[in-house]
Amino acid sequence: MAAVNDNIKSYTGFKAITILCLVVLYAPLVIVTIYSFNASKSITNWEGLSLYWYYDIFAGPESAKWKEAAWNSFTIAIVAATMATSIATLAATAMVRGGKFKLRTASFGLISLPLMVPEIVLAVATLIFFNSIGFTRGYFSILVAHTAFCIPFAYLPIQARMQGIEDSFEQAAMDLYANKRQAFTKILLPLMMPGIISGFLLAFIVSLDDFIITNFVKGAGVETLPTAIFGSVKQGLKPNIMAISTLLLGVSVVMVTISYFVSKKDNTQ
């Protein structure tokens, strides 16, 4: 029987396809980043390096709009990620450590449903639900929608981390006269922390970058950075939009980097 070649890099065209995918994915981001330092008011003509458009974000004519949108985005992302991570931690504990119970599979499917349903469908459904219960659209409607939407993103890394922890640690603690609460808070929770941090960071990025759901459930006069950028683009593409997009990209890169090092540190322990 012929041996199976499991080295995917040896297949014909792998390198070319990989390079093509990387160019398609990252070339636009590189171009936006480069032109955010362009001194020209045109988005196509290069006139030298300048930080003017970053200055314009913080002190220009539209700085108040960007600051308010940034405040809304970051406060909503922090609170929504915190609430979603807390709920996801409790859900993962029940699913992994709760033993077999009725509707366990259905519960997992319900938690994972937002990952499989198109976001536009979730946005429309959330809007209809808020209107049906008379919930005023605004800052808090965005917060509630983001919290619900971010739960599965926080749940998956937390569940994966908990599944890798043997229950013998908690059993040993209970053999030493610890109750279930103490076994959870003193033993299981610290071991879960890398997964919890990863889940929080992922939920934070999803909330910060979300546009579709936010655009549907936000009220008049309430803007986040993605919706503010979209509104500005409709009036014409300006270089300061490239600058604010680069800053958002930088925040995402920092969060992913932190998550990577947290996971790497956990794997070396």
Image (cartoon, rainbow, N blue to C red):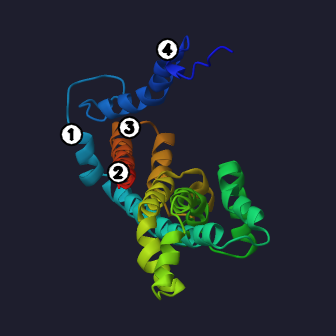
The percent position of residue 114, horizontal first and vertical second, equals: 67, 56
Q: Are marks 1 and 3 in contact (CB under 8 Å)?
A: no
Label 2 element class: helix
Q: CA distance from mark 2 to mark 4?
A: 34 Å
Distance of label 1 from label 4 (alpha carbons): 36 Å
Q: Quadrant of residue 244?
A: top left
Q: Foreground mark, 1 or 4?
A: 4
Q: Amino acid at mark 4?
A: Ala
For the residue labelled by badge 4, is the local secondary structure a helix, a strand or a loop? Answer: helix
Task: Kindly identify which residue carries mark 2.
Answer: 268
Image: 254 above or below 150: above
Badge 2 amino acid: Thr
Give me the C-alpha separation between circle 3 and circle 4: 34 Å
Say which of 112 and 216 sits in front.
Answer: 112
Q: Amino acid at mark 3?
A: Lys
State the residue position of label 1: 51
**How many residues crowd around disc 3 within 10 Å: few (fewer than 14), some, or many (20 or more)?**
some
Crowdedness near tag 1: few (<14), some (14–19) or many (≥20) residues, C-alpha within 10 Å: few
- Mark 4 residue crowding within 10 angstroms, few (<14) / some (14–19) / many (20+): few
Work out whether mark 1 precedes mark 3 in sequence or the reverse, and give the earlier one. Answer: 1
Counting residues from the start of the chain, the first of labels 3 and 4 encountered is 4
Mark 2 or mark 1: which comes first in sequence? 1
At a point 40% along the width and 33% down the height, the residue shown is: 29
Quadrant assignment for the C terminus: bottom left
Side (left or right) of 2 relative to 49: right
- Amino acid of disc 1: Leu
Comparing 85 with 186, the one in front is: 186
* Residue receiving disc 4: 16
Check disc 3 and report its element: helix, strand or loop.
loop
Callout in the foreground (1, 3): 1
Residue that carries the numbered disc 3 in the rendered image: 238
* Mark before the other along the chain sequence, 2 or 3: 3
